[in-house]
Image (tube, rainbow, N blue to C red):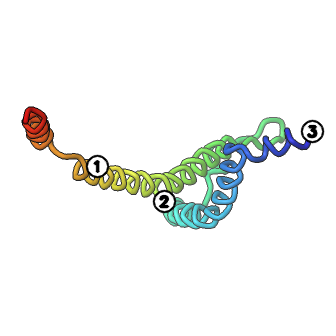
Amino acid sequence: MLKGFRDFISRGNVIDLAVAVIIGAAFTPIVNAVSNLITQLIASIIGKPSFDNVLEFTINGTLIQPGTIITAIVNFLLIAGSVYFVIVLPMNKFKERQAVKEAVEEAAAEPSAEIQLLTEIRDALTAKK
């Protein structure tokens, strides 16, 4: 039983998930700050930081606020945009630069086709002697 638990914990997936949760928690203040900034900009434009009161109406004395759905969608888009532009986009650019750097280093390490051909000719001539 303990061996199975140890195998489960030592899998890369569990460790990766734990690291992702910790990193996500560390990025939460950044995402919240960007989201709050955009929410404040929306509040300065429309006068309120949410759309909760948009299209509200009452039925039999019950207040119905379809604007809460709009607020939830806007909040989701703000958080998704913040994560994309603050985390995903810079990481993708970093990975692209690393891939280009590795490709250049790999190309420099391998001799060109002409050099390889000349080496083969040299080796064939040496073998004939």
Element under label 1? helix
Q: Residues within 10 Å of mark 2 (few under 14, many from 20)?
A: some
Disc 1 and disc 2 in contact, CB within 8 angstroms: no
Q: With respect to residue 31, does 67 lie above or below?
A: above
Question: How far apart in space, not on screen, are marks 2 and 3 (Cα)?
Answer: 43 Å
Element under label 2? helix
In what quadrant of the picture does the N terminus appear?
top right
Which sits earlier in the primary sequence, circle 3 or circle 1?
3
Disc 3 and disc 1 in contact, CB within 8 angstroms: no
Element under label 3? loop
**At x 58% / y 66%, what residue is drawn?**
30
Indicate which disc residue 106 carries.
1
**At x 69% / y 59%, what residue is drawn?**
22
Residue indicated by mark 2: 86
34 and 102: which is toward the camera: 102
Q: Residues within 10 Å of mark 3 (few under 14, many from 20)?
A: few
Total residue callouts: 3
Left or right of 127 on screen, residue 28 = right
Residue 112, horizontal then vertical, whole percent: 15, 43
Left or right of 57 on screen, residue 117 = left
Question: How far apart in space, not on screen, are marks 1 and 2 (Cα)?
Answer: 31 Å
**At x 64% / y 59%, what residue is drawn?**
23
Indicate which disc residue 72 carries.
none
Residue indicated by mark 3: 1
Residue 121, horizontal then vertical, whole percent: 8, 36
Residue 63, horizontal then vertical, whole percent: 78, 44
